[in-house]
Amino acid sequence: MIRPPARPAPAGTVYFSLLGPLTAVRDGRPLPLGPRKQRLVLATLLARPNTPVPVDVLTDAVWPDDPPRTARKNLQVYVSAARALLGSDSRDGRDRVVHGCGGYRLTIGEGELDTLRFRSLARAGRAAGERGELRTAARLLREALDLWEGPPLNDLRDSTGVAEEAERLEARCLTVYEDWAETEIELGRAAVAVDGLRDLVERHPLRERLRVAWMNSLHQSGRQAEALAVYDDYRQLLARELGLEPSPAMAALYRAMLGRGRTARPAAAGRQAAHGTALPAAHGTALPAAPRDFTGRREELRELLALLGSPDERVVVVSGPVGSGKSALALRAAHLLGDGFPDGRFHVQVRREDGSARTPAEVLGELGRLCGVRAPGGSGVPAESAVTAESAVAAESAVAADSAVPADATVPVGPERGPAAAAVSQGAADAWQRWLSLHRALIVLDDVPDEAFVRGLLPRSGPSSVVLTARGQLAGLAPVHRIALGALADGEALELLAKLIGPGRLRTDPAAALRIVRACGALPLAVGVGGMRLAVLRHLPLAEYADRLGDPSAALDELVAGDISVRLRMASGWQDLSADDRRALGRLAGPAQEGGFTLDGAMEALGCGERAAIRTVESLIDAGAVTSPAGEVTAHAALYEVPRLLCLYAREREEGGFSPG
């Protein structure tokens, strides 16, 4: 059960506010917070209270472009100033800001920071709503919103790092405002929410849940024409900006408003037992441990955190070749987001240990168990219920239009899945989509095989977000944001190697260390395996190991550490390719190993014409086996590349007479 919010701290305590400009008050008097860089450090620590903040994150917040050589020393000065301002912990006399292996951690209580009190009030309000205590829920949610004084940290948003934290805070405030507005509408007090909803829709025009609440509040206030105009404006905006239509649920609400006068708004979907129940939010974390040797990827991590903190991005695809660190990036972001997803952060591995894909039914079953989703009748989402694109769309449409389809009806998966595939439970699909629409959770679906596998699992409405990691581009999914990973930069790969073998050993022969990471294709998996092997073989000179890796016939044999084998990982990626792509990659591996290949080189290696070569190369790009230039360039001018270790594996298969059938 959610505990009641704590009262503000006693007199003499410093109270910090982030939900507006950064301020600090003691006994009603504002406190000076020092120069701008010092305030940036304080804001970043306060934005992640009671959680280690990596030094890199603080550095990026203060010096986003070019940190000085004295950055770490300067940070220590700013942190010392924060310690002086905060004082010691009254409970044990320890410093409030301490440094550990994960970075700087600021310890602060709910009565000392507005975002913590906001979170506590919001959780208590949601819990009251789940119990049916709507008046209490509305009061607590309103108390939380009274702490929101404007765009969070609006005086420091010129720092990219602080702006990302501020956007996450604002997204959380918007979700609570939507909760409050929907509760007031259910209580028949829609008029109190109309003006605020209008202002927020103007600032966040693509946030559908706000639009729906505004429509409902206008309708329940007797302003039907204005309510219908809200939908028409939104439909035109989506079509113009994104080429999309409003969700089936919103379209159904519009049709219902056209067909009836002013009536009481029905209870929220999450409280309707007749249509299945979405349980109270799990408020939990089901993530593997954060990757301890995560290195580099600063720009990609910053982009991913910004996207997941945005109210407008629901699905992000992180793609890249085998061993490029997709899972590590997704998990790093999930751990850093902390309270950005108050209803939980969950990770599901889509493949088994042997690299074969699980069934969508198994994945949906695990998601249901992790998130506490109940299908109609009160049981958990059944493991035997698979979700496909067709069934999920059908399910959502049925709910939106108040269809007469029975809750336990099943929908065929489709001929492409084969006659033995399990049918889809309409009720399970409904329950999962309803849970996503009512909760702000982060779902990481790791190592997705193809688009069809996940279409029915992705949110169609609501504030939840999903990160998909995949070897291929998943080009058939839209609209999604994409982050493509390639090899690490030399410096980042050397940093990773140093973490594993020790910086002192790396400094003994930096030239050999550079040869090692380049022979590994600068892929995090291969550099990591090589580093683990060297950490055990302390006697082995770096130059000798670099020579071994430089031998094409021996490199994959050397990249084994215990039960971790780069060759086995390459084999799993190889099996994902179609027979034609495998055959083509085997033939392109030769020219690719010589420093990349052009379209003319592909035509020669494949023995085909220009159009066929373009289609083949682009198919391999789509599958994540070939990389193309980042900028726009004609097909004839482009230089295409295949990761070195994948080249070696493809040559092995080609020379071994492998017949991909």
Image: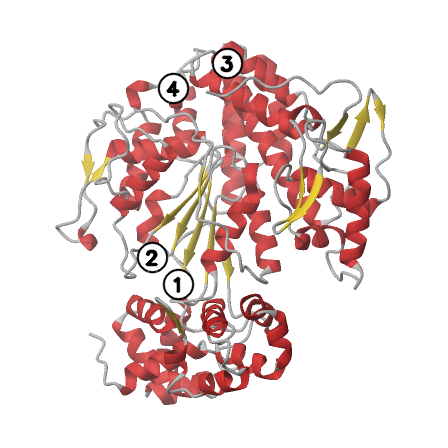
From the image, tell me which residue sits under label 1. 472
Q: Spatial distance from mark 2 to mark 4, Cα to Cα?
A: 34 Å
Where is residue 523 drawn, in percent x and y? 49, 70
> Residue 450 has which mark?
2
Element under label 3? helix
Query: Image check: 600 left or right of 64?
Result: left
- Of callouts 2 and 3, the N-terminal one: 3
Instruction: Work out whether residue 353 or residue 432 is closer to the camera in this orientation and state it.
Output: 353
From the image, tell me which residue sits under label 4. 271
Where is residue 62 drawn, in percent x and y? 76, 51
Identified by mark 1, the residue type is Gly
- Of callouts 2 and 1, the N-terminal one: 2
Instruction: Work out whether residue 133 or residue 495 is closer to the camera in this orientation and state it.
Output: 495
From the image, tell me which residue sits under label 3. 220
Q: Do the residues labelled 2 and 4 touch (CB within 8 Å)?
A: no
- Of callouts 1 and 3, the N-terminal one: 3
At horizontal 49% and vertical 74% (from top left) the residue drawn is 534
- Of callouts 4 and 3, the N-terminal one: 3
Identified by mark 3, the residue type is Gln
Q: Are marks 2 and 1 in contact (CB under 8 Å)?
A: yes
> Residue 310 has which mark?
none
